[in-house]
Image (cartoon, rainbow, N blue to C red):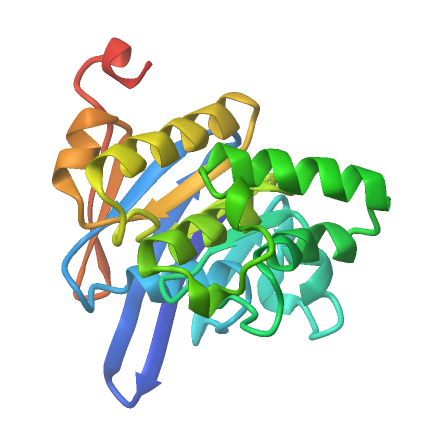
Amino acid sequence: MIQLFNVCKVYQRDQYALRDVTLKVEKGEFVYLTGPSGAGKSTLLKLLYCAERPSRGQILVNGRNITRFGSARIPYLRRNLGIIFQDFKLLHRRTIYENVAFPLEVQGRKRFEISKKVYQTLKNVGLEHRLKHYPLQLSGGEQQRVAVARALVVDPLILLADEPTGNLDPEVTMDIMGLFKSANARGTTILMATHDRSLMREFPRRTVSLHAGSLAMDDLPLFRGAAE
């Protein structure tokens, strides 16, 4: 589903954000991407949805070499992705309903289907009562839940999540992780960047660690049953 071959990203001469990363994520996997700040986690995710281009190496997503994509093909790639940005990237002039509906509209879904899907997804994150509000009327944690809803509403083939529980209290974090587990059980492949060690202990999954742009560890839970 996701493959990286000797991927490097250099922003300035000899300053590597990623260095020779080779990684494979199978269809239906749930993988944590971890490491200290500046390790390259966000850069790796940006490469997968073509917000950045690798300096060297090849990247395959769903069997397609996205390093060869021209700008016209990128929107079609993103239609199959759910993306949760660290800074949310909500549309401030659109209501919460309109923000979550937007990716469904891009897909050309029918209006009644969009309405039903958006309401149910907002209900799942506990924000159905806020659908007529605007992002700046919400707290940071509520905005983060809107970002989660927008990513999940399309039932994506792949979910790329950059610190999706960073501003959430423990109870809401458990709810969001429950939604991720359900999406994963339905077949969504998940790559989630996080610093939260307690979360990784509570929901053990394969963990890929980066350090200074290089792959430092690729580890599975000790017990198969722990990941159920």
Q: Position of residue 55 (x, y in %)?
A: 43, 76
Q: How many marks?
A: 0
Q: Is residue 126 above or below residue 46?
A: above
Residue 1 in sight here: no
Q: For this rendering, which residue is in front, 124 or 165?
A: 124
Q: For this rendering, which residue is in front, 33 or 103?
A: 103
Q: For this rendering, which residue is in front, 90 or 19?
A: 90
Q: Position of residue 47 (x, y in %)?
A: 47, 64
Q: Is residue 175 above or below residue 49?
A: above
Left or right, residue 95 beside residue 217: right
Left or right, residue 69 beside residue 108: left
Q: Residue, x 43% and y 33% (percent of image)?
A: 180
Q: Is residue 22 above or below residue 158?
A: below
Q: Quadrant of residue 38?
A: bottom left
Residue located farthest toward the top when viewing the structure as drawn = 225
Q: Residue, x 72% and y 35% (percent of image)?
A: 116
Q: Residue, x 39% and y 32% (percent of image)?
A: 30
Q: Residue, x 60% and y 56% (percent of image)?
A: 132
Quarter of the image for the N terminus: give it. Answer: top right
Q: Position of residue 17 (x, y in %)?
A: 28, 72
Q: For this rendering, which residue is in front, 185 or 173?
A: 173
Quarter of the image for the C terminus: give it. Answer: top left
Residue 103 in sight here: yes
Q: Is residue 194 above or below residue 93?
A: above
Q: Position of residue 219 (x, y in %)?
A: 21, 33
